Amino acid sequence: MNVLLDHLAEFREGFIGTVLLTLASGLLAMTLGVVIAGFRVSPVPPLRMFGTAWVTLFRNTPLTLLFLIAWFVVPVIFVPGLSPWTKALLALSFYTSAFVCEAVRSGINTVPLGQAEAARSLGMTFTQTLRMIVLPQATRTVIAPLSSIFIALTKNSAIAGAFSVTELFGVQKLLSDKGFPITWIFLWVALGYLVVTFSISGLFRLLERRLGVAR
Amino acid sequence: MTASVLYDAPGPKARIRNRIYSVLGSLALVGLLAFAVYRLDAKGQLDPKVWEIFNNAGVRTNIRDGVLTTLKVFAVAGALSLIVGLLLAVARLSEHRPVRWLATGFIELFRAVPLLITIYALWVLFLTYKQDLGVIGDNTAFWGLVVGLTVYNGSVQAEVFRAGINAVPRGQVEAAYALGLRKYQVMTTLLLPQAIRSMLPTMISQLVVTLKDTSLGYVITYTELLFATRTMANNIIVNGENPFTAVTIVVGAIYIAMCLALSSLATWIERRGRRTKTGVAVAAAAEPAEAPGVLDASGGPLGPTADREPRP
Amino acid sequence: MKFRKSSSAAVLTALALALTACGGESGNAGDQPAGESTGANAPKLPTYAVAGNVKIDSPTLKKAQQAGKLVIGAKNDQPYLGFEDTTGKRSGFDIEIAKMVAADLGFKPDQIEFKTVDSNVRETTISKGEVDLYVGTYTINDERKKQVGFAGPYFQAGADLLVRKDEQGITGPDSLKGKTVCSIKGSTPLQEIKKPKYGAKTVELSKYSECVQQLLNNEVDAVTTDDAILKGYAAQRPTKLKVVGKPFTKEPYGVGMNKDDKALRDAVNSALEKHEKNGDYKKAYEATLGLSGSPYSEPPAVSRY
């Protein structure tokens, strides 16, 4: 019990770290994922190739390896001088964006072809078709998988703990090293994650209800 | 590209425009690649000497041992996670309330906690009770990793099984009971075979996740492929530099190849399953983490099969 | 069927290639025995007389004797201290200390099983008995004594700073304001440098060698840890790195073991004292750590408690 009370400051700091990292990389992953999904369905072959390569690379590489790349390869080849937090953000959001991309793409593919054709024969332009016909329907299909992806992201952010970012896993390890019983620490840390993941799934369920219109 | 939801068949103007974009896009891609190669070269990472480290017997043994340990953990954890998943799924669908609650609690807890944290906690726990654990106590890091992977992936697999079982038409179960089959007979001869068949691609995709997650063993000093990689990258010096880039590229390629081999198996089964015309549709080979409904704790349509096109 | 077979076969072939692509003769150009001296007149490593029929009332030791091997935790990425080359051979001062202690406990070098344990899991692995002994630049302090027993000290180090060769601005811990310093989670120098009076930003990783890599990549401005470790890295890359040379803490290294195993602690202490007296210690030092440019100094007196 008193493991929590005595180290409330550490737990709070770790919890906030986890939430912030999840939020930021969730946003970036969302943006990247939609852009890459756009690439993957575009009529321009090189863009499609880029999209496919992106998804294959980031989906099949262990996240820890991506973290190592962000720490030891990216500074050498591309941009030096990123803070540990930025590196974690990049690794997490690039990894997650591959999953977001696939969810968005399959969402777009579930919209029946006939609807788009109908829209076009009504004289709608590309943007109009996208905005009024395809996207509203795709969004609804995409919400459920997105919710799971963001929950996975929350959990994956634990890996950042080993790379100089303050979050809940770091707290667990610190307290365990100090010799506190692991079972209690585990349960409290688990509770922290449960709070985050349940808020995410609650939020998405709310969204689903808002957008859920009978087809 | 065949007909798309997004685009009309391109006319002459659009075709020209697409071609221009293609050229620009290709140039951009080639530019990006060239830039990466240029930077690598400028930092001396393309020096043949750097790549010669892979000719070294020690390095090759390290990589081979790393791959073998990774595959060993994966084989044990993958098999165990399927068994645990099956048991949990059946328990969660049980008619006895305590059993159902216990299974649900187990699944929800371990699915919500990051695997890294589970593995670390299990390892410390195993170390604490080392003496009383026999086989597990002798090789705590291995079993910490394996059991961690098993409880997490088992929980996910349980949900996959459950989705598959729920996708079997209700009428079949009623018919079976009407014929006088017992509960376990219904489960073993009717529900499970169909559930496993329809969910096989999803199960294999989750196995890919299991394979990737073996890399978390570094946190408990288990020397799998990624751990070996780090040691090599840190301890080898060529021209006064650590060959981080070279080692990462090679090991990354190995991981990607292993994962692709597994997922191509999933796609193959999916495609084969689609051609047959029996009861339950085969699910798409999506990782359950993305498959709608599977990771969704609430009720609602269960599993990917629910929102696929109606069965023939 | 045809297509699918060929595609998965292709992937498998790629995998096989990745594994065996470099199949060829062993041990050519790539061998990198870094942190080891191969010169003709380099100091030779001593060998230690293995004690026979050791009877000590220590539970840890009894278990090790039954198993026929002693599990010793060590570092694998610190040149001249605890280092593992690509063939899996370990070398360094800590490894020698481990061997001489093991010899007195009745274990031959081939009966020692070395296990790589990074700084951030030391307390856990030692207190839970995953390793019997731990010899890896392990500073004795009171906080750790709550969980781990220490024999020794066998060496006195001090926290120092490793910087790039062309660095002018950093001359000691007081000139670190606004600079980024890398060290290991939970290490003693890190706790010191984190104090607000220094005003330094910190990056915490799990291996010193990864900190050194960050320093070489200009991602951090300095690496802080014990001078003995830093000198090893500087000696590995003399054209790129240097040690500032102003130790600002005292780090007495001890051999870590189970907290309650007093018999084992006393035995290890006696072993250390014996080898310090009979000259093995000095020989081992000169053949390892001495090569990184730190002159030999008398070991600190062993403190029994």
Image (cartoon, coloured by chain):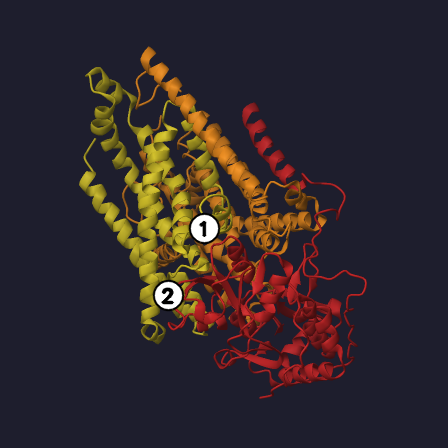
Chain at numbered mark 2: A
Q: Position of residue A132 (x, y in %)?
A: 20, 28
* Left or right of B52, for residue B300: left
**Relative depth, front residue between B229 and B306:** B229
Could you say which quadrant of the image residue A116 lies in?
A: top left
Q: Which residue is mark 2?
A: A187
B77 vs A132: above or below: below
Secondary structure beneath label 2: helix
Q: Residue furthest bottom?
A: C305
In the orientation shown, which residue stands out farthest toward the right? C40
Which chain is rendered orange in the image?
B
In the image, what residue occupies the spot 39% across and 70% down? A184
Q: Decide: is A135 above or below A16.
A: above
Specify whether residue B258 is in view.
Answer: no
- The numbered dot on residue B43 is none
Nearer to us in this view, B34 or B1 = B34
The residue marked by circle 1 belongs to what chain? Answer: B
Q: Amino acid at mark 1?
A: Asn
Q: Which residue is mark 1?
A: B153
Mark 2 is surrounded, within 10 Å at the Cα level, by few (under 14), some (14 to 19) or many (20 or more) other residues, namely some
- Residue at screen point 55% across, 41% down: B42
The furthest residue to the front: C168
**Nearest to the observer: residue C79 or residue A163:** C79
Letter of the chain in red: C
Distance from label 2 to label 1 (Cα)? 19 Å
Q: In what element is the residue under mark 1?
A: helix
Which tint is chain A? yellow
In the image, what residue occupies the spot 60% across and 87% down? C303
Image coords of residue C55 (percent x, y) = 72, 84
